[in-house]
Image (cartoon, rainbow, N blue to C red):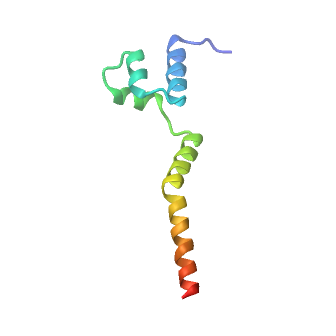
């Protein structure tokens, strides 16, 4: 096992906080960064669960309504 550096602990802490949806501005303040871009560029990545969550949210906003609209259009086309 390799030694754990302080920087490794800092990186892990920041990454875990962001993964738990702690606001980036809070993490920025904890780390003492002057620019939010530094915090986000350094400590965030696109995780599969984030992609899935984004897809579910878009589906909730658009998917159900579009499916209902498509169903209504199909029913109207076949009825008329």
Q: Residue 25 location in percent, x, y?
A: 38, 25
Q: Nearer the viewer, residue 12 or 67?
A: 67
For the point 53% across and 59% down, the residue is 63
25 is higher (above) or lower (below) than 78: above
Q: Nearer the viewer, residue 16 or 21?
A: 21
Rendered-image quadrant of the C terminus: bottom right
22 is higher (above) or lower (below) than 31: below
The quadrant holding residue 47 is top right
Q: How many marks?
A: 0
For the point 55% across and 21% down, the residue is 12
For the point 50% across and 36% down, the residue is 45
1 is higher (above) or lower (below) than 16: above
Q: Residue 14 location in percent, x, y?
A: 49, 22
Q: Nearer the viewer, residue 63 or 68?
A: 68
Q: Residue 29 location in percent, x, y?
A: 38, 18
In the current view of this chain or complex, which residue is farthest to the right?
Answer: 1
Rendered-image quadrant of the N terminus: top right
In the current view of this chain or complex, which residue is farthest to the bottom?
Answer: 80
Q: Nearer the viewer, residue 7 or 45?
A: 45
Q: Residue 32 location in percent, x, y?
A: 37, 15
For the point 41% across and 21% down, the residue is 26
């Amino acid at each position: 096992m390799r030694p754990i550096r302080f920087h490794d602990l800092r990186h892990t802490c920041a990454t875990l906080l962001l993964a738990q949806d702690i606001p980036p501005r809070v993490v920025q303040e904890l780390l003492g960064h002057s620019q939010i871009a530094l915090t986000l560029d350094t400590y965030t990545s696109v995780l599969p669960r984030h992609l899935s969550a984004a897809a579910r949210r878009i589906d909730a906003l658009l998917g159900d309504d579009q499916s209902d609209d498509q169903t209504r259009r199909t029913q109207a086309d076949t009825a008329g």
